[in-house]
Amino acid sequence: MSAENTESVAASAPATDAAPAAAAPAPQPEAQPATEPATSSAPEAAPAATPAVAEEKKEEAKPEEAAAAHPEAPTEKKDEPAEVEEPQNALTKKFTDAEWKAVKELRAKLPEVFTKAYPDASPVPTSITLWGVPLSTEPHAKASVILAKFARARNLDVAQAEEMLVATLRWRDEIKIDEVLKEEFDADVFGKLGKVFGKDKEGHPVTYNLYGAVKDMKAVFGDVQKFIRWRVQFMEQSIELLDFETVDQMVQIHDYEGVSITQRDASQKAAAKEATSIFQNHYPEFLSRKFFINVPTLLTWIFWLFKPLISAATLAKMSVVGSGAKTIGAELSQVIDVKELPKRYGGEAEGFASD
């Protein structure tokens, strides 16, 4: 169970030491010419040095002279490609070395990702845009933030992150995401189910899911695929508030006021299951915090029942809060300034209280 993804309804080898230099040849003992008795008073010309002696003389030359006379051929150095300096922003500066490694490896695999995601495309794109950010093999700070999300969601396993990215691009193509973003939904029904209002103390936008705002559940869930398209559109609109430079996550508040967990029908359960799968598999690492408020007692028990199965990292993002403005406000105001928190939740902002 993941706080990110749960959708409840009514995600150079050290250079080795250099080889020791070849030792200079040991000095040879100087040849001593044999003395012979003089046979004449006239001086004789000195005999020419024999080849062997001449060779010995050469060997007696000082090492530095020998080096000057016979300089070693310079060692040819292979040009190594200089490492490209990564463009940075406030978010990328927080990456660990392991995260940077995963991001670079995943970026290098993008041509392969695009080929797998768009097998019928001719030619295969060399760049695509995801959540307003161009993705290609060219380094780009915002793109690094996006790629890091997929890497983190798969514990920096690049192969699994690649699979997740391929699946996400295919899914967006299949659902026709551009058409979903343009679709118009009944404001009297879907307009009341989701709100985006204010920011938390770290600048994350805050979204509210108001499951009990519409009493006619058939109008909401009668067409499961229509609900899914609305829910995806709402998520995409929320992501548009992220700049991927200073902020790349949001706070979600799920309000269960007026919701009866025991009265959920098959359509509601199917919608919840499909939405959970979508956010788990295609919207990685988008949640900063997640609050469940006005939670029915039964749902609270269910949460505590599954708590041992939730990872510590996920659990740290989740909070189950009771009912009443005072109780809710005491919890939410630790993350959201009261001036950004609607009065209905114990804050000072008008928010959407009159909606």
Image: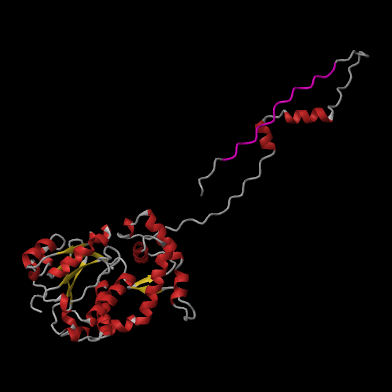
Query: Who's the residue at 25% across and 70% down the image?
Result: 6
Locate residue 152: give its quadrant: bottom left
Does residue 11 sit above or below 259 in this rendering? above
Most foreground residue, 344 or 261: 261
Magenta-tinted stretch: 18-34
Q: Position of residue 60 (x, y in %)?
A: 72, 28
Give the colouring mode of the picture: secondary structure
Q: Position of residue 58 (x, y in %)?
A: 75, 31
Query: Who's the residue at 44% across and 69% down the image?
Result: 110
What main secondary structure does the magenta stretch of the protein show?
loop
Query: Who's the residue at 32% across and 84% down the image?
Result: 179
Q: How many marks?
A: 0
Question: In the figure, is residue 249 to the left or right of 81?
Answer: left
Q: Position of residue 53 (x, y in %)?
A: 80, 27
- Taking the magenta stretch, the answer to whether it contains residue 28 is yes
Q: Position of residue 337 (x, y in %)?
A: 13, 62
Question: In the figure, is residue 213 to the left or right of 46?
Answer: left
- Taking the magenta stretch, the answer to whether it contains residue 8 is no
Question: In the figure, is residue 275 to the left or right of 155?
Answer: left
